[in-house]
Amino acid sequence: MTLYDLVFGPFAEFGFMRRALVGCMALALGGGPVGTLLVLRRMSLMGDALSHAVLPGAALGFIFGGLSLPAMSTGGAAAGLAVALLSGLVTRLTPLREDASFAAFYLISLALGVLLVSTHGSNLDLLHLLFGSILSVNDTALILIGVVATITLLTLAAIWRPLVVECFDPGFLRAVDGRGGLVHTIFLALVVLNLVAGFQALGTLMAVGLMMLPAAAARFWVRELCTLSAASSALGFASGFLGLLLSYHLDLPSGPSIVLVAGIAYVISVLVGPRASLRTLRLRRRWSPS
Amino acid sequence: MNGSPDRAVVLDNVTLAYDGNPAVRNLSGAFIRGSLTAIVGPNGSGKSTLMKGMAGLLRPAAGLIRSAGQVGGTIAYLPQHAEIERGFPISVLQTVLLGHWRRIGWTGGATRKLRERAQQALAAVGLEGFERRPVETLSAGQFQRVLFARLIAQDAGLILLDEPLAAVDWRTSEDLLRLIASWQQEGRTVAAVLHDLDQVRAYFPETLLLACEPVAWGPTRDVLMPRNLRRARRVAETWSGNAGHHWTDPESWATPALQRDHRVIENKSGPLWQDGVGSDRSVR
Ligand SMILES: Nc1ncnc2c1ncn2[C@@H]1O[C@H](COP(=O)(O)OP(=O)(O)O)[C@@H](O)[C@H]1O
Ligand SMILES: [Mg+2]
């Protein structure tokens, strides 16, 4: 078996691997900038919360429509958006902070989701929902992922500036532009859409990994906002590629494999990245007079 | 009231409150167009609240605020505790360009002319050549200068500054005070919350002395009379409990910390406010 067979063989041979790869690429395209903004807005855990929130909707879709992508995606998107809007409402109307209200709603949502799946489906279905399966990335799924990536990039292009300013200086945005809250809501909707797009291949719990880990890792390599987004997209795609190979050769579930590869990239970045990683901090300490 | 073009902000028996608790009560008066007014008062006397009200970020519980924003003018507002993410990857020039928000909005591009204006603004605050620096690498004083450059770029008719000199070094505060004074010369209306009464006397022709209710408003020399300052303090004491009873001399507002400060020069003509520094004047 040559290296070529090892690395490209699976994609050359099997249509489902090619589709999964293209899916990962499209996911990484939208996930890069969205994840970068999540990290910069200190909302990394919010992304995680939203990914849990998607579950009961997807489960409901599954119960009524079986393993049908449109049903599960619609349900997941509806549940995710509902949690985003409801916790936004609670944050605005009560003294509860956004992270707390998010946590409350996603816990309710997750419990509901697990309950629904465990009473109406087999354990296999639950595993499938939670961790995804590349086999299920069919043409419909690819189209969905492509549409979401397109919507994400176009929307980001339209709201990029207020989004960035709301993150850098929210008070300024409030003073010069009354639509800051709208921007925040649109952004949360984009996060939900990307999670829904990812859950076929990665599962509801893992989809957020392809968004957050590359974005967190990129912080250790580049500084500028646009390069950050591009670097996270590239890292996300590389993780997808390697993770799929891993999952194919070792017969592992695709979602966790991809996210683990992204996680390894993150750990390496923390250790040796050129910007504020542990390595550079140690170097600096050695130089500083003591 | 739109028929009075000489007034930038008109306050008509304004009360501003949080959850029904008034922070500013029964304030009437006007900021004349082109005036330069200092707003002073003890800690918790409603200065920031008034600024928020004038910036349109807080709706009066009673009364009416008519400011430039509502009659077609523009307002630039620098809050006291700007919730700015200093580690955000954005450059100095990009930050100043945000001042052009009204012209570029969500998606517009910064034209060469706008870039040049932003560069001129940076030059005016003494930060020529800093354009490409990430803001996270700036000192507190340099960063405040960047925010002032952004204010210049905003090119507003009414400029509201809430303790703009609180965290900056002496050099920077002198430079920024001169800049504020130059804005008045350009015909802008400026209101600034300040704590150093010497700075107020040196740079601000008008002063509003606030202690929840207005104590005095007019020419700085008249407003900053010991009689008024005492009254402001008395009113302040009624809402801050036992605060202030450490001072036996009713005129002594000066904090030991400030007196030790190198910028406090010998014959101080009047008392200083204490705010925060000694923490024995905590509100509520
Ligand atoms: N966001 C808020 N919510 C409730 N009360 C507030 C808020 N901000 C200020 N206050 C209260 O309003 C009063 C005036 O505050 P402020 O305008 O900040 O005073 P100053 O700026 O003069 O120090 C204080 O008693 C303060 O506790
Ligand atoms: Mg204040």
Image (cartoon, helix red, strand yellow):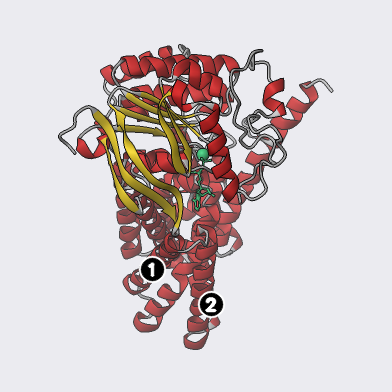
x 45%, y 24%: residue: B222
**The C terminus of chain A lies in quadrant:** top right
**SS assignment at label 2:** helix
**Mark sitting on residue A67:** none
Of residues B102 and B67, the one drawn nearer to the viewer in this rendering? B67
Q: Which residue is mark 1?
A: A82
Label 2 marks a residue whose chain is A
Q: Toward the viewer: A255 or A41?
A: A41
Q: Is residue A19 left or right of residue B249?
A: left
Q: Are marks 1 and 2 in contact (CB under 8 Å)?
A: no
- Residue A51: give x, y in percent of width and height: 48, 63
Residue at the farthest right position = A290
**Where residue A21 sits in the image (x, y, percent)?**
43, 53
Q: Nearer the viewer, mark 1 or mark 2?
A: 1
Q: Residue furthest bottom?
A: A119
Mark 2 surroundings within 10 Å by alpha-carbon count, few (fewer than 14), some (14 through 19), many (20 or more): some
Residue A12 vs A94, above or below: the answer is above
